[in-house]
Image (cartoon, rainbow, N blue to C red):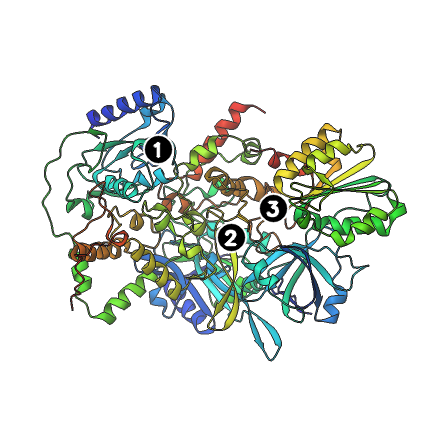
Amino acid sequence: MNLLMSRDDLIRWLELLLQERTLIAPIRVQGLLLFQPVSKVEDIAFDFDNTTLPPKEWYLPLTETLFSVKSGDGHTELVPATVEREAVIFGVRPCDAKGIAMMDSPFLQEPGDTVYGERRARTALIGLSCKQARPECFCTSMGSAPDDPSNVDILLTEVEDGYIVQAVTDKGKALLPQGLKESKAALPAPPEPQAVPTEGIVQVARKLFDEPYWERLADRCLHCNICAYVCPTCYCFDVRDYPDDGKVERVRSWESCQSPGFTRIAGGYDPRATKGARLRQRFYHKLLYFPEQFQDIACVGCGRCVKACPVNIDIREIINDLQQLGAKSGS
Amino acid sequence: MALENPFVPYLATLKSVMELTPDVKLVGVELEDPAIKAAFDYKPGQFAFLSAFGVGEAPFGIVSLPQRNNSLEFAVRQIGTVTRALHELEPGDTLGVRGPFGNYFPLEEYRGKDMVIIGGGIGMAPLRPVINTILDHRDEYGKLLIINGARTPQDLVFAPEFKTWMEASRTKLELTVDRGDEQWGGRVALVPDVVREVAPSPDNAIAITCGPLIMIRFTLTVLKELGFENHQIVTTLEAKMKCGMGKCARCNLGEKYVCRDGPVFTMEQISQFLEQP
Amino acid sequence: MDLELIQQIRGLCRDLLRNGEINCVIGYERASDGLTARPFFAYEPAAVERLIFDETCTHNLVKYLSDKKGEKIAIVAKPCDSRAINLLLNEGQIKRDTVFIIGVYCPGVVETGWNRKGETLQARCQTCQLLKPVVYDFLAGQAPVRRTEGERYPDILEVESKPEDERRAFWLDHFGPCIRCYACRQICPGCYCPECFVERLDPMWVGIRIAPKENELWQAIRAFHLAGRCIGCNECERACPMDIPLSLLNRKLEKEVKELFDFQAGLSSEEQPPFATFKKEEKLGFEE
């Protein structure tokens, strides 16, 4: 049963949530649009396309301490990180929600990342259907849709007199305020993003590993990490010990497979020493390796990388190119 | 019982240190918590991360055997910041252990077969528990050929165990170095050339090799010349690792993670990656 | 797009590739939005048909010369870009005889992003002091109409006029969102160190933590490493996904070096940057 929520209802509900939990929502910061904890509901941006960074940093922070080391009197103790915060993230687009769900596969696989798991358990997602598709969007070619409720706890779809509310999970049902009326209205037709030919891309990619295409494409790649950092499904990280003011912390931070030296071992050997090998790795992880393990292509079609890449490395163009190369080389 | 955070190491004490070569030390490590120590079960091929707290951690093959050794043993070659810090530790110091991770040599499947063990330099380390397992169950395996090479005689790893290996039944040990010295009266040749010279038969045999990548490539060529097929050739790989659990997405060879689907691989699984220039 | 200019460039590149004088041309082609430009590497004569040059060609292609060392390369260079070529020549990073410089008379470029093309020239173009490249082997196009010489540093003067704590707050607010993607470094022709100071872990100058204190260190030290070397192409600011006003910071140091040493990077093929030289008659007075 769908419910109807007016704009005033929504504001009141968010204010209630804010009192009980950490409320994270899109906020304008220095001209950027970022998911941040909210202190006042008025700060929330309600009218937006999508944020600069996806909400993944609330599950895999840019930087976090895995544990700290306390030593003294010949005795050492390791103090692991804990998660206490109960949170709600409001304003998540279906593509970003799919990205979060996809990250569960590597992170919760045995042995599970317990801190990530805690964050997932203690965070609820309130999704917001997209009213329009931007030129760089292609979620429907990647198994999602502008109004896909699959990976959120509650999905709101804006209509003339407010929002149609779909409670998707029990967690979502429990969060909703009392007294909402039933909505018999049909859900509006979603916008139609551009189509990208992803059919069979996994099989095609498997054949093209040795193609010179990758070194040529990598000529203009700067290996700057932007694509991976704005991507809802990229999750590579670095781990280092940080001796800081006498206290030792083991810190995990974002890193990406594009960094030179990502795979270089002590002694100097690097299995991905060339630009082409590193660039190919990113696309193969998304289009071949991840789907081979977890069935999903590791891309949700949000288009952030297309917008953000300073040299126009465009995953949609690459998928097109691969399909053409694959057709030429035969089966 | 709450789920353990797999990023947090077990605390361990450094029990013993033995210099094997000018840059390789054999360290023996004992887990502090008796319950964790009792539950820490591992097989040849698996690895663990050693933490020098404040500097970092790195993965090392476990070179001991649960049945033989009370401590966990690792052969640590000094080559970077973490290994340098580990080399500076002394018995009694605290360090961290995370593991065991990875797959293992399916030694039970190899029962009855002739075993050809080919190691170069520090690559001998993960092969040592394989050799010892075969020696501990000598009747269950066929012939054992060990080819062990290094840059110089001082760099031959596990020299204290050579006598035991040589004296085992149906076992041959062939040592070789790239460069000899005044005292060295043995063979001076590259490992792949020794494999060609000794020419082990591929019939009912398994070859396990580990060493510098260039050695593995040339050894692979020689083994194929001798008639070994891809499923008979096994190797163990190293890679830069941060998590050991297939999460940081860095140690992969194609879709296989060295930390989770390896580090033990047959040539069938990885030859496409080694044949590249 | 100036068709005559682009035919000149295409014809020249076709010949250079055909007679094997160069391995590769680094120029521009149309991007996937059909509107803006992106870097393009032409290895075969037929590929030169994809080369373009128009007001969306804001990218500084000189960065790629550091990736292609040892090869014979032709490169399309705007006047600002050509200063970066001088920088690499002065600092011994490339050899003059390995690069064929196709200089272009540049009428200025507009702000671009993916599928986004500005209407007016970029601020740096409006105050550009150069009409033509400072070093070239071939000059394409025609001299543009002289632009009004504006005050080069109005936005810097504005920040300079604030009291210290306001300035500190201004910069910390901007460095806060930095995600340490290092795009600014990767896109900068002047950042070519095989191991950047930030990758050094022993000693650990900055480390991997992505947090305000570390971000501040990263930004400040990189700015100082570019002092007297930055040629003002603005690529760092264009690339930054978090809209940090990097050009402001780098041009501030350019201004300081100009005032202290009367030096601007990349204007001459021979002159050494101030921090790589010492002259007895240097001015060492500091203003209050």
Can you identify the residue that label 3 sits on?
Answer: A294
Decide if residue B133 is in sight here.
no
Nearer-N-terminus badge (3/2): 2
Q: Is C167 situated above or below A110?
A: below
Tell whether C85 sits left or right of C211.
left
Q: Which of C273 and C163 lies nearest the eye of the viewer?
A: C273
| Dots 3 and 1 on the same chain | no
- The one nearer the camera, A189 or B119, is B119
- The answer for how far apart the CA atoms under marks 3 and 2 are is 15 Å
Subunit that carries the residue with mark 2: A
- The residue positioned 42% from the left and 41% from the top of the image is A192
**Which callout, 3 or 2, points to the residue nearer the camera?**
2
Identity of the amino acid at label 2? Tyr
Residue kind at label 3, given as amino acid type: Phe
- Which residue in the protein does label 1 denote? C40
SS for dot 2: loop
- Rounded to the nearest angstrom, the CA distance separating label 3 from label 1 is 36 Å
Residue C19 percent location from the top left of the image = 34, 19
The quarter in which the N terminus of chain C is drawn is top left
Asked which quadrant contains residue C206, the reply is: bottom left
The chain to which mark 3 is attached is A
* Numbered circle sitting on residue A235: 2
Q: Residues within 10 Å of mark 2 (few under 14, many from 20)?
A: many
- Identify the residue at the far front of this view: B182
Q: Secondary structure at mark 1?
A: strand
